């Protein structure tokens, strides 16, 4: 048996004081117990010992403090009075601005109705002139020019930005590569539209904007413009034609494969479906740029005048 002494375990029955619940929050406890910095406390004690008070003792100092308080009260009172006086004037000006905006909006709506009525009248006269001088080609000419509403079978193609697309990015994609922002660019929509034309579409619209032979798809920052009208995603493209055949031909074309690449590699969302009936509105502003006589126009009695219009 080893002769070395061993320390006996402490079995004292004296209870140790319980630990404070906030023992683990020493920093917070110190802040609460010493809310006043020690330096400030010492400075206050020195002033108290020296008999220095924060309030002025001399009559002159007291008068100066009173004058300052009176001046501050006067400034606050004058400011409140001016604000109260100006409030009715500002309210009146605000109401007048609202009335001017409402009158301007009403006048703009009235002018727009006149423009729409005049445009409808011009379109009607143009249609009558085409029927009178163009014979059976009038409807075909109106269809090709985009001056009339078109209803028939076709396809509906929806193109949208990727879900993770950034709110802002660079310019349109360059021909050598793509931007990885996942946004649909003007060049993408140009290829989509051209691919539909090549696949046999007879008429096309993008977000309700009818395309003609003079339509332009451009970019202004991140916005896509169709005939200078800004469009927002998703972009809904309607095309009139043989629905199923048009859909298959487009998806098999180079432009359809291009759109598939955007979908697979950049997250651009697309959806195409053949529709039994789609309706395309007429182009909003068409102007006759050229006109020339057409030989062989006939009079009402059937005689040939030798000239005509087209």
Image (spheres, grey):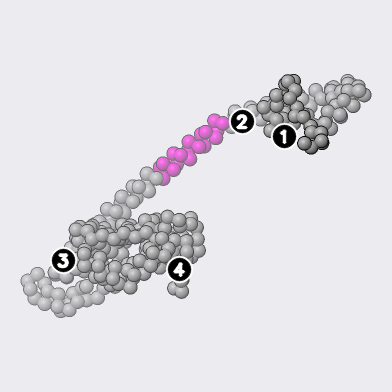
How many other residues sit within 10 Å of disc 2, few (<14), some (14-19) or many (≥20)?
few
How many other residues sit within 10 Å of disc 4, few (<14), some (14-19) or many (≥20)?
some
How many other residues sit within 10 Å of disc 1, few (<14), some (14-19) or many (≥20)?
few
Q: Secondary structure at mark 2?
A: helix
> How many angstroms separate mark 1 from mark 2 (CA)?
48 Å
Disc 3 and disc 1 in contact, CB within 8 angstroms? no
Magenta highlight on residue 146? no
Residue depth check, mark 3 versus mark 1: number of the one nearer the observer: 1
Disc 2 and disc 4 in contact, CB within 8 angstroms? no
> How many angstroms separate mark 4 from mark 1 (CA)?
55 Å
Q: Which residue is mark 2?
A: 83
Q: Quadrant of the N terminus?
A: top right
Q: Where is residue 121 shown, x and y percent of the image?
A: 24, 57
Badge number at residue 27: 1
Q: Secondary structure at mark 1?
A: helix
- Can residue 219 be seen here? yes
Span shown in magenta: 87-104
Give the residue at x 44% y 43%.
101
> How many angstroms separate mark 4 from mark 3 (CA)?
48 Å
Toward the left, the furthest residue is: 301
Q: Which residue is mark 4?
A: 178
């Amino acid at each position: 048996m080893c002769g070395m002494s061993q320390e006996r375990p402490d079995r004292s029955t004296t209870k140790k004081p319980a630990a404070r619940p906030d023992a683990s929050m020493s920093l917070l406890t110190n802040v609460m117990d010493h809310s006043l910095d020690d330096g400030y406390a010492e400075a206050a004690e020195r002033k108290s010992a020296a008999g220095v008070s924060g309030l002025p003792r001399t009559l002159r100092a007291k008068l100066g403090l009173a004058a300052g308080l009176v001046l501050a009260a006067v400034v606050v009172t004058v400011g409140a009075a001016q604000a109260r006086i100006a409030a009715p004037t500002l309210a009146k000006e605000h109401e007048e601005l609202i009335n001017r905006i409402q009158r301007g909006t009403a006048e703009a709506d009235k002018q727009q109705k006149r423009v729409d009525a005049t445009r409808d009248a011009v379109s009607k006269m143009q249609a009558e002139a085409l029927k009178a001088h163009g014979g059976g080609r009038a409807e075909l000419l109106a269809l090709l020019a985009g001056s009339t509403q078109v209803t028939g079978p076709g396809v509906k193609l929806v193109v949208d930005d990727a879900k993770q697309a950034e709110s802002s990015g660079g310019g349109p994609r360059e021909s050598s590569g793509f931007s990885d922002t996942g946004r649909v660019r003007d060049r993408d929509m140009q290829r989509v539209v051209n691919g539909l034309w090549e696949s046999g579409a007879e008429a096309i619209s993008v977000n309700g904007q009818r395309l003609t032979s003079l339509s332009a798809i451009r970019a202004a920052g991140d916005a896509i413009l169709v005939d200078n009208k800004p469009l927002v995603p998703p972009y809904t493209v309607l095309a009139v034609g043989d629905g199923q055949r048009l859909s298959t031909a487009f998806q098999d074309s180079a432009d359809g494969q291009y759109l598939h690449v955007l979908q697979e590699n950049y997250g651009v969302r697309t959806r195409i479906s053949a529709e039994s009936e789609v309706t395309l509105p007429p182009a909003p502003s068409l102007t006759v740029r050229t006109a020339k006589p057409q030989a062989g126009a006939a009079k009402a009695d059937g005689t040939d005048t030798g000239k005509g219009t087209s």
